[in-house]
Amino acid sequence: MTGHGKKKARAVRTPRIDMVLASSSPRRRAMLAEAGWRFRVVVPDVVETPRRGEAPEAFARRAARDKAAAVAARLGAPTGRRLLVACDTIVVRGRRILGKPVDAADARRMLRALSGRTHAVISGVCLWMWDGGPRPRRLTFAVRTAVTFRRLGAGEIAAYVRTGEPMDKAGAYAIQGGAAGMARRLRGSYSNVVGLPMEALTERLRRAGWTPAGSRGHGRKTS
């Protein structure tokens, strides 16, 4: 009803969140976009090298923190709300971290090491959340997924490496691409293996009271 008796209700606007993804990964950008999140990308200039004696999960967490800190320093403090997301994903066989292969021979060696065995995919995630003040709230966590490969033949490995897909992937494979049929079993987050644990990210932000603009979903979990 309008007129003399009642006033029109005013729409309450939620302050816009400036969401920044600190990553050069096209897979992370794609996952956030598919979830409907509105964000911008700032690529961190960070060397991702494990320190002597550093445990794999500790390295993934530190690498994510370093990426977040590098981008935060470049951007400076915001005037409003900002969410900065950084992630580092590694493939681990035993205690050995398998990074991106340096050449085709290295990629073949990695895939032979994973063939018929179970390995871990670990993502370190670091969130910096500014809520109008000069200092952000910082949160770092890690997600681990166990992946078991079936036995791979030498010809199959060589053919996959020739596609070029393994060359910019940790562990020399893309679970969402040509390596989809190589995984016999996966325990944990599928999106974590792709490169960003969407389930855990969404839940941590929900607990912290943050909902990125446009967000409407998350990844899937399998067992």
Image (cartoon, rainbow, N blue to C red):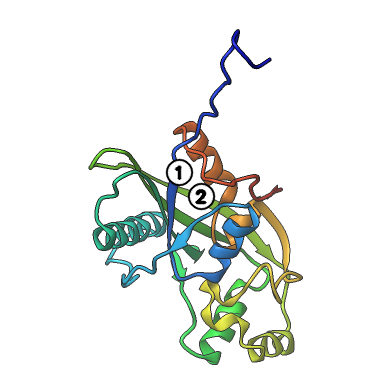
**Residue furthest toward the front?**
4
Tag 2: residue type?
Val
Q: Secondary structure at mark 1?
A: loop
Q: Which residue is mark 1?
A: 16
- Image quadrant holding the N terminus, namely top right
Q: Quadrant of residue 115?
A: bottom right
Residue 10 percent coordinates (x, y): 53, 25
Percent across and percent down for residue 51 are 28, 66
What's the residue at 53%, 52% (across, down)?
144
The residue furthest top is 5
What is the CA distance from the residue labelled 2 to the residue labelled 1? Answer: 28 Å
As drawn, is 36 to the left or to the right of 79? right
Residue 158's disc number: none
For marks 2 and 1 on the same chain, the one whose residue lies earlier in the sequence: 1
- Nearest the camera: 185 or 166? 166
Q: Which residue has dot 2 on it?
A: 143
- Depth check: 41 or 63 in front? 41
Secondary-structure class at tag 2 = strand
